[in-house]
Image: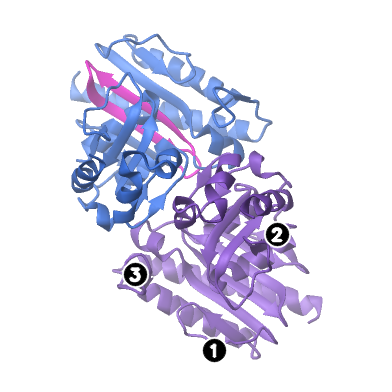
Chain colours: A blue, B purple
């Protein structure tokens, strides 16, 4: 794709997300319909569904070649990263959305033949839209976002996942002990966005593709590293324990986790 | 104190805090001077010091009878809760202040002969000032704050402290397992304010007096309960493992922790 077309697409996706945000905010003033998916901690609401419908329709309008993998199943059955693949999480952190009305995100990742191309994390209540990719650069609310300093694990706060930390999977307690302390927010989107800004040195959690697809594009565009916590590459079509970190912190964490 | 005088004092403290916020925001644009206190995770900055100076001076101006217990030692040596006691934390969550420029709070608690009288938690970057007490009511940015629903532990998110959770002190992992999940923010002020709004069902951490003095006034004014995690009353002049929760969640947690 020509760079000008990519930049136009980038602006169009941001406009769609801003429209989605306005709709979500309006619906937050009404009664939510909440259902459990796999457990009492895995929720879905009418807003997840309606927002996914909206985002999927917008993507189809913008990119007729789109193959769309979307959390709530409104997209396509995607089995390969060939072609134009869009990965959508309409509400990341639904538990927070329901119980806190805060600390949740919308996320979209766009891959062309497997290459990270565009990514979007929208912190809805914080009103911060992280957007862009390796060719168009990364912005927050339209202003360029500077790459975070390449600090080591000891120099930053660590974004943790509660199950991995409590069960001490992948030496998570030793990793946290080296950091300046753990933070748990309950939204991959929010915590990955904090790695982008340097508020966190790293974030590690068991994630599904729509939890990390957007973040990978943005993180790699800023010189950050996203891998599985065993050091192997992430697979965009399967779930895994994913680590996103500065280059230095990534090396340190992978060495501890071994 | 007459109610009208108390309301006047309440407004004056809020005005002082808003002035303090403007100064802190201005100083965040300059280079911070950061020092370690007891460990690499226990920080103090020039802004903690200057803001404590400011708040202590404001309190002395408003209440010439004030005995002031302040985190960084700019107040008085307070050994009794008799008379007018003000307990001040100029920057709660200094680690977040330094590394995130977000998720920190100013806090002031005012006790008269040991009675919780006025409390203030200022989420500086969220720009939310929680203020008031049992006689004047509780407001956020001047608007009345409704008491949160009296939900049980299973129905809400749990504000945790990393050390208590990792070391499983007071059966913390069993408590978290009953909740909808833990959240760790690294600021007592921010997390207690989230209990006030119902975003968290409870918060438990090892705290010093300036970490919980303000929160106790506000929490009790809204029908929430603050005790030590063994069920005994908090002591305003000593540190301890403190639990603030809805009445129902408090009963459940204290039963598990036994």
Q: Position of residue B219 (x, y in %)?
A: 68, 61
Which quarter of the rendering shows the C terminus of chain B?
bottom right
Lower sequence index among marks 1 and 2 = 1
Which residue corresponds to mark 1? Answer: B77
Q: Are marks 1 and 2 on the same chain?
A: yes
> Which disc number belongs to residue A172?
none
**Residue A227 % position (x, y):** 24, 33
Q: Quadrant of residue A129?
A: top left
Q: Are marks 2 and 3 on the same chain?
A: yes
Determine whether the residue tagged by mark 1 lies in a helix, strand or loop: loop
Dominant secondary structure, magenta: strand
x, y percent for residue B26 = 39, 68
- Which mark is drawn over residue B225? 2
Q: Chain of mark 1?
A: B
Residue B120 horizontal side relative to residue B248, left or right: left
Q: Is residue A54 above or below residue B76?
A: above
Identify the mark at residue B39; answer none if there is no mark.
3
The image quadrant of residue B31 is: bottom left
Write down the quadrant of residue B34 in the picture.
Answer: bottom left
Label 2, secondary structure: give it: strand
Q: Which mark is first along the chain, 1 or 3?
A: 3
Which numbered disc, 2 or 3, marks the residue that appears first in the sequence? 3
In the image, B83: left or right of A133?
right
SS class, disc 3: loop
Part of the protein shown in magenta: A104-127
Q: Residue at x 64, y 82 (%)?
A: B85
| A114 over B88 or under it: above or below | above
């Amino acid at each position: 794709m020509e760079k000008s077309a990519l930049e136009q697409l980038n602006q169009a996706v941001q406009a769609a997300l801003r429209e989605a945000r306005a709709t979500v905010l309006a619906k937050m003033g009404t009664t939510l319909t909440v259902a459990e998916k796999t457990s009492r901690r895995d929720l879905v609401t009418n807003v997840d569904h309606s927002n996914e419908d909206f985002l999927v329709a917008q993507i189809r309008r913008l990119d007729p070649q789109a193959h769309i993998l979307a959390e709530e199943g409104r997209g396509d059955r995607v089995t390969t990263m060939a072609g134009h693949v869009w990965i959508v999480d309409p509400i990341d952190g639904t538990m927070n959305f329901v119980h806190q009305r805060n600390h949740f995100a919308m996320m979209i990742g766009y891959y062309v033949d497997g290459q990270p191309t565009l990514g979007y994390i929208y912190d809805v209540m914080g009103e911060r839209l992280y957007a862009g990719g390796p060719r168009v650069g990364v912005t927050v609310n339209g202003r360029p976002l500077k790459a975070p300093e390449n600090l080591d694990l000891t120099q930053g706060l660590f974004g943790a996942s509660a199950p991995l930390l409590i069960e001490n999977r992948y030496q998570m307690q030793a990793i946290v002990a080296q950091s300046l302390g753990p933070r748990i927010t309950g939204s991959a989107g929010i915590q990955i966005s904090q790695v982008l800004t340097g508020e966190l040195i790293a974030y590690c959690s068991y994630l599904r593709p729509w939890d990390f697809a957007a973040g990978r594009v943005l993180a790699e565009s800023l010189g950050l590293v996203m891998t599985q916590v065993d050091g192997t590459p992430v697979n965009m079509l399967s779930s895994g324990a994913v680590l996103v970190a500065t280059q230095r912190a990534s090396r340190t964490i992978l060495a501890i986790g071994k």
